[in-house]
Amino acid sequence: MNNSAIEVIGYDKCTGCYGCLNSCPVESAIEFKKTDEGFYKPFLTEKCVQCGVCKKGCPVLKKVNNNLKEDLEVYSCWSKDEEIVKNSSSGGIFSELAKEYLDNDGIVFGAKWQEGEIVHCAITELEELKDLQKSKYLQSKIETSYLEVKKYLSAGKKVLFVGTPCQIAALNTILNHRNLITVDLICHGIPSYSAYEKYIRENFNYNIKDITVDFRNKDIGWENYNLTFKNKDKIIIKNNHRKDIWFRGFLTDTYLNKPCYNCKFRTLPRFADITLGDFWGVPVEVKNPAGTSVVTINSKKGKELFNKISSNLEVKKVEWEIALKGNPCLYNYKMNDSRREGFYKDFQKLSFKKLHKKHFPFPVTKISFIRRVLGYLKRKVM
């Protein structure tokens, strides 16, 4: 008998990429369930025969990366279509890539909202693209998407698959096909569904199934964006990303998935054919204030696809070091997990607002500091 992938690596190293599920030959031998910390992870059922095949789909155990460093090219770019830029988190490059496939009878896999959570799915029509646009800062449930990709490829279809670096690494362990192009995202890490659910329930008195979020609403700008919380199509509230307490916890790395703190997939070369992200810190001479994407071309296949859409883009070549400076998650970036243990220790005992104040408060500005001091002195005098 062979140990399973999860028994070998343990839950602290499991990214929740679904590679094991998609490689398991026994139906229902593995099921993904949400842990107490709020992450989907694999659990063995009584149907597991301990064949060990799931290890072949685990990117932590089996890394497959055929890209070469010498193929790396880095660009600052954005779509020439202002409407696409407006409806995208940054420069709209994913939408342009997707359009190229959808206009030519191809298949596009990406993440969408479904009953308050994020799921991966395939689309075939241009009108479905809006569901996959915009950043979604929660774990995507892949389910059997990798096997669906395999079926489409076997049927002669061309497939574009977009996901996080660990998801692309998992797909690489299962598939290598000339008609498959992979796109990964510059990933800050996956935040906890449990933290998100607690925040939604306590602040808005809603179940997460009733809520969708535009995490990157650009009504006031690309770099100074809002989080827009909706119940169906009705806006509940817009919070600036600098003032939203859930987003503060995410950006301070308080409740990320354990392996995200030292991600093994922030490598060079990257695992995907193309990497996309916001070009934070972009030099003004290669910047679109409405939204600028950083794009790294990581393979010859990626370059070929990028050339097909380049006429639809404003494209500026930049040095790798410039892109890396504002986007450290591109390569070998380790995060500080010092807040995490205390947060989960207090998670059941404290409200989300109290967790925020204790573990990831907003930084104290000079003005607020002076106000606090004056308030303290006033109380002392009284």
Image: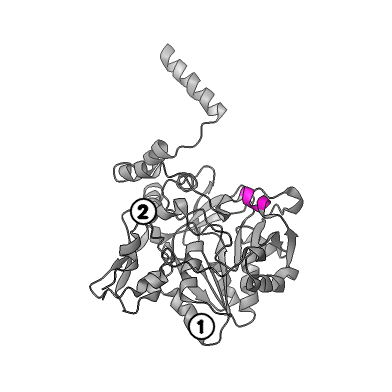
Residue sitting at x 45%, y 50%:
261
Classify residue 231 as left or right of residue 345.
right
Residue 323: x and y in percent read 65, 53
SS state under label 2: helix
Q: Give the residue at the far top of this rendering.
A: 381
Task: Please provide percent x and percent y for residue 347.
Answer: 33, 45
Q: Which residue of the protein is positioned furthest toward the left in this rendering? A: 46
Q: Earlier in the sequence, mark 1 or mark 2?
A: 1
Whether 283 is drawn above or below 115: the answer is: above
Q: Which residue is mark 1?
A: 152
Residue 81 quadrant: bottom right
Residue 219 drawn at (x, y percent): 62, 52
Q: Residue at x 43, y 65 (%)?
A: 17
Task: State the quadrant of the C terminus.
Answer: top left
Name the dominant secondary structure of the magenta segment. helix
Going by the numbered disc 1, the residue's amino acid type is Tyr
In space, the residues marked 1 and 2 are separated at their CA atoms by 34 Å
Q: How many marks?
A: 2
Q: Which residue is mark 2?
A: 194
**Amino acid type shown at disc 2:** Ser
Neighbour class for label 1 at 10 Å: few (<14), some, many (≥20)?
some
Q: Nearer the viewer, mark 1 or mark 2?
A: 1
Q: Which residues are magenta?
A: 321-326
Q: Can residue 220 be seen at all in this image of the molecule?
A: no
**Left or right: 13 as drawn, with respect to 276:** left
Q: Position of residue 29 (x, y in %)?
A: 29, 74
Residue 246, numbered circle: none
| Residue 140 quadrant | bottom left
Label 2 CA crowd tier, 10 Å (few <14, some 14–19, many 20+):
some
Report the quarter where the N terminus lies: bottom left
